[in-house]
């Protein structure tokens, strides 16, 4: 297969949802279709197995959330599909935001009874801002839920999307009879107790045909016809171009648990979802078809085995091919690195590969060279854009609780910050370290990992900040900037790249600062340059 054909068959995407909407279940069913796993439950049971062998994973398991963002790849028809798993828990939202910089499209899973939930809103907003193509999957149709039209209204209003259904439910909950597939023009009947892998569909090109009554009954048949008519009047016709530019989002209905409506989703997905997309760097737009390699690190995963301290850096390949033992430029460090055992991912396994293509993710063993956002090239000095740090929402001083282990503590903090577990700020005034996180849970994770992976102990103390504002003076030499720094000195710090940050203690204080020092600009993500 040629290089261009390899690119054309790749589909790299993420599934986003509020916890419990059914992301894991859907992922598992997709893997079943790809033949990558043999039985339902494999994805989950594997998580538990891993949990039993490592303490850190045990925390994760006990809390019932997935801390790790992993890659699941499989083949379906002639396509190579890479699913980047995204943690749904809000405390790990930043992890998910970063993963979204590495996907080419997303599937949004919504619970039919709960509708649009908080976490879905936040994640979809990030995708919308980046014009990432999105497909919506409304899940749990085997249960009573909201009316399909109301739900689509809700999706339009709350998620600010423009939707059009490509499948439509016939009844719901107890009366759920099946799904009319608008995309393929056929009916798929639901049998309540069936958890079969491949369903049979009944082709139905003419919805007016009297046969419909015979299959689903008179009342539901009439209702379906009315609903389809309404859909034709109210919703725009599906257009692949509009979907790809992020202007139109097709909606599917189904039940992941019952493996219902999943094949329809997957079949449409492989046809319409984008191939690996071009990506902006600080100097130019990089296209996947370019021969030379480029890629960026979007995730660093600590090794779960405490005996092997190395980490796995996840690199999304943007252009060219990634080959084993070939030297690549680590742009930030300005040095060449070779990798003798790059990992590729297949289902839940990883294995060493010789060559990977745009759209693929390679896992590189790393002993501390990489930070999130680092770019690899074949010599070109450029950096991919778009992995900003957002302002944390919680701030605490971190103190050393074991004076004999200060070196270990420093190393541990340094490495955990490189992984993107949290953000570190150093106060200008006295050099004290403040850790900022998105959720309170990360403090426990950090404390636990410092102790178990670095033999260091820490305690926390409250720091009264509310938001981190990255500071950019119009003129670093002017009097106003000097005064701002003097007045706010207790709240001034630097992030780990040495950028100046104002750790504001309230919204009010941010507003006052903006009024009083108009020449000092404040930014709420680190991506302001
Ligand atoms: P995640 O947190 O989004 O990954 O959600 P899970 O896939 O773990 O699902 C959460 C719960 O919803 C589990 O108990 C699933 O068995 C259940 N679930 C998933 N899909 C369906 C569905 O189609 N119908 C019903 N009734 N339950 C479902």
Image (cartoon, rainbow, N blue to C red):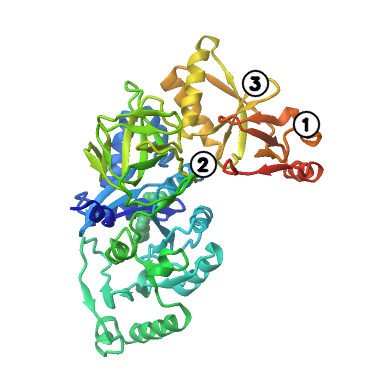
SS label for mark 1: helix
- Name the residue: 35% across, 25% down: 310
Is 461 placed above or below 381 here? above
Residue 89 in view: no
Could you say which disc has been placed on residue 431 in the image?
3
Give the mark nearest the N terminus, 1 or 2.
Answer: 2
Q: Is residue 471 left or right of residue 259?
A: right
Is 49 placed above or below 181 here? above
Residue 385 image position (x, y, % from top left) = 49, 45
Query: How far, Cα to Cα, is label 3 from label 2?
Result: 27 Å
Q: Is residue 394 left or right of residue 329?
A: right
Residue 144 image position (x, y, % from top left) = 42, 67
What residue occupies the far top of the structure in this picture?
A: 404
Which residue matches tag 2? 91
Residue 360 image position (x, y, % from top left) = 31, 46
Give the mark nearest the N terminus, 3 or 1.
Answer: 3
Q: Quadrant of residue 240?
A: bottom left
- Name the residue: 55% across, 39% down: 439
CB of residue at label 3: within 8 Å of ligand 1?
Answer: no
Query: How far, Cα to Cα, is label 1 from label 2?
Result: 36 Å
Is 244 placed above or below 420 here? below
Q: Residues within 10 Å of mark 2 (few under 14, many from 20)?
A: some
Query: Given contact means CB atoms under 8 Å apart, are the residues at marks 1 and 2 in contact?
Result: no
Give the mark nearest the N terminus, 3 or 2.
Answer: 2
* Discs 1/2, front: 1
Residue 283 in view: yes
Query: How far, Cα to Cα, is label 3 from label 1?
Result: 19 Å
* Discs 3/1, front: 1
Is 70 placed above or below 136 here? above
Could you say which disc has been placed on residue 482 in the image?
1
């Amino acid at each position: 297969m040629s290089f261009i054909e390899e690119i054309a068959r790749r589909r790299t995407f993420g599934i986003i949802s509020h916890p419990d909407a059914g992301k894991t279940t859907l992922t598992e069913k997709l893997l079943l279709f790809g033949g990558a796993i043999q039985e339902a439950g494999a994805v989950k049971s594997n998580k538990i197995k891993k949990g039993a062998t490592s303490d850190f994973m045990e925390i994760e398991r006990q809390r019932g959330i997935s801390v790790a963002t992993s890659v699941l790849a499989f083949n379906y028809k002639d396509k190579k599909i890479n699913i980047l798993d995204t943690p749904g828990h809000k405390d790990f939202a930043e992890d998910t935001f970063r993963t979204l910089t590495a996907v080419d499209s997303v599937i949004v899973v919504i619970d039919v009874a709960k509708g649009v939930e908080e976490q879905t809103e936040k994640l979809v907003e990030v995708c919308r801002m980046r014009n990432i193509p999105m497909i919506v999957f409304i899940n749990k149709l085997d249960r009573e839920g909201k009316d399909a039209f109301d739900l689509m209204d809700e999706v339009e209003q709350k998620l600010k999307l423009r939707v059009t259904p490509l499948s439509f439910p016939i009844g719901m909950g107890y009366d759920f009879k099946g799904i009319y597939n608008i995309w393929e023009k056929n009916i798929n009947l639901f049998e309540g107790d069936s958890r079969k892998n491949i369903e049979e569909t009944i082709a139905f090109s003419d919805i007016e045909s009297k046969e419909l009554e015979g299959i689903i009954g008179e009342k539901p048949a009439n209702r379906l016809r009315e609903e389809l008519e309404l859909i034709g009047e109210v919703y725009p016709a599906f257009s692949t171009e509009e979907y790809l530019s992020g202007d139109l989002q097709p909606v599917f209905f189904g039940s992941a648990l019952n493996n219902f409506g999943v094949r329809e989703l997957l079949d449409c997905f492989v046809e319409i979802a984008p191939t690996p997309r071009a990506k902006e760097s600080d100097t130019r737009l990089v296209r996947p078809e370019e021969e030379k390699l480029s890629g960026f690190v979007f995730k660093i995963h600590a090794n779960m085995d405490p005996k092997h301290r190395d980490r796995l850096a996840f690199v999304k390949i943007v252009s060219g091919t990634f080959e084993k033992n070939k030297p690549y430029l680590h742009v930030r460090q300005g040095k060449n690195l070779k990798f003798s055992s790059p990992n590729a991912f297949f289902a839940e396994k990883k294995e060493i590969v010789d060559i990977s293509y745009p759209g693929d993710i390679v896992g590189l063993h790393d002993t501390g060279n990489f930070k999130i956002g680092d770019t690899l090239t074949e010599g070109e000095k450029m950096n991919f854009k778009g992995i900003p740090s957002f302002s944390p929402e919680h701030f605490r001083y971190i103190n050393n609780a074991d004076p004999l282990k200060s070196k270990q503590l420093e190393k541990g903090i340094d490495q955990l910050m490189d992984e993107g577990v949290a953000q570190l700020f150093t106060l200008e005034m006295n050099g004290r370290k403040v850790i900022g996180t998105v959720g309170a849970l990360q403090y426990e994770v950090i404390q636990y990992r410092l102790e178990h992976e670095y033999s260091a102990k820490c305690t926390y103390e409250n720091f009264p900040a509310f938001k981190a504002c990255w500071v950019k003076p119009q003129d670093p030499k002017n009097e106003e900037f000097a005064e701002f720094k003097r007045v706010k000195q207790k709240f001034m710090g630097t992030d780990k790249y040495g950028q100046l940050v104002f750790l504001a203690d309230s919204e009010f204080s941010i507003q006052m600062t903006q009024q009083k020092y108009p020449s000092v600009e404040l930014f709420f993500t680190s991506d302001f340059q």
